[in-house]
Image: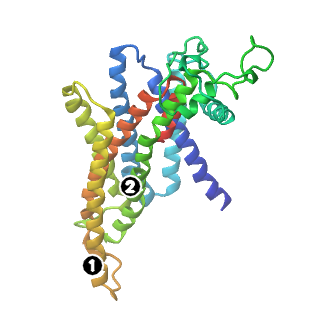
Amino acid sequence: MGIFYTAPCSLAIGAEGIKSSVSGLGPDQFDQKDEKEKAQMTHFFNMFYFITSYGTLLAVTVFVYVQDKVGRGLAYGISSGFMFVAIPVFLFGTKRYRYKECKGSPVVQVLQVFVAAIRKRKAEFPYDTRLLYDHSPEPGEARIYHKDKLRCLDKAAILTKEDFENNRFSNPNPWRLCNVTKVEEVKMLSGLMPVWSTTILHLTIHSQLSGFTIQQATTMDASIGNFQIPSASFYTFFTGSIMVTLAIYDHLILPLLKKHKMSEKTGLGLFFAILGMAAAAQVERRRLSVVRAQRGSNTLTLPVSAFMLLPQFILVGIAEAFMYSGQLDFFTRESPNGMKAIGTDLFF
């Protein structure tokens, strides 16, 4: 049993590590100062999720069939084989990738700003914000100028005599004093939290489809003639709607839009998610009424078509397409330059 519980945990850690790393590595290959490459980055996010959904589509069709007809061992073996092939394919491009210089952990920077601000919580603000510690950022790092929001964090940039460990010419203790650029980067990251919070409930909808809705399908009639559709294969309609939505948006809608905002794309995703859950509520209401009517019956399958579940799969799939690509693009663009990794990790 120990191996049984360890394997899924290891799989979850590895999968999420790959997803967050790839979504961070991809945007690094585009120069945001180049307008042409900046425009191509939106297509990257759409294609990234399109290909991810294609893999999911194979999982809920081909691999479900292999599991049912042959065995789980072969299905897991094929999946492992694809992962082994992916490693040399990824390594093949190591000399062509664009690399950005590692400038320390962004998590440490966030902690430093908060610790410094707490230490100086009783310090008086200078009469002029230009008196805040605005030491030049490191080479290759863009300067960010002070903004009048989240003023409590500005205390991390107030100069005091205890900030320099040895003498006035030494580097300041970063846990006591942070320059304005670092403070503003943490402010920018804090500004992403309200948008990030909208993904929490949306992810519960995703888990609803992959868990409860699949269980609903097992109790309903999922046959077409003499062919019985595996309940897990209904997830195909979810991934299929994602792929169709991304293809239509990327090739038909996006070229017609002169200006598009990722916040609008996210809002559209939330709208379709609401419609999907409304449809799910109606289906469950109908299913429960049949369960009450069939009380006392020995029939395991309810006389209700499982295809009633399709509207919620399709609507939530459309929502997922807009939410996933929209928020991934939003977090990547709006995160500070030194905190792009945290921005994409927030989404995953």
Amino acid carrying label 2: it is: Ile
Q: Is residue 148 above or below residue 345?
A: above
Q: Residue at x 38, y 40 (%)?
A: 324
Specify whether residue 81 is in view. yes
Q: Position of residue 42 (x, y in %)?
A: 34, 27
Q: Is residue 214 above or below residue 334?
A: below
Amino acid carrying label 1: it is: Val
Q: State the count of labels.
A: 2
Q: Reading the chain from its start, which is encountered first: label 1 or label 2? A: 2
Q: On residue 290, which mark appears? A: 1
CB atoms at circles 1 and 2 under 8 Å apart? no
Q: Secondary structure at mark 1?
A: helix
Q: Is residue 111 left or right of residue 220?
A: right
Specify whether residue 240 is in view. no
Q: Is residue 277 above or below residue 117?
A: below
**Front in this rendered view, residue 317 or 95:** 317
Calculate the distance from the C-alpha at mark 1 to the C-alpha at mark 2.
24 Å
Q: Which residue is mark 2?
A: 205
**Front in this rendered view, residue 86 or 30:** 30
Query: In what quadrant of the picture does the N terminus appear?
Result: bottom right
Q: Position of residue 333 (x, y in %)?
A: 41, 27
Q: Is residue 275 above or below residue 48?
A: below
Q: On residue 84, which mark appears? A: none
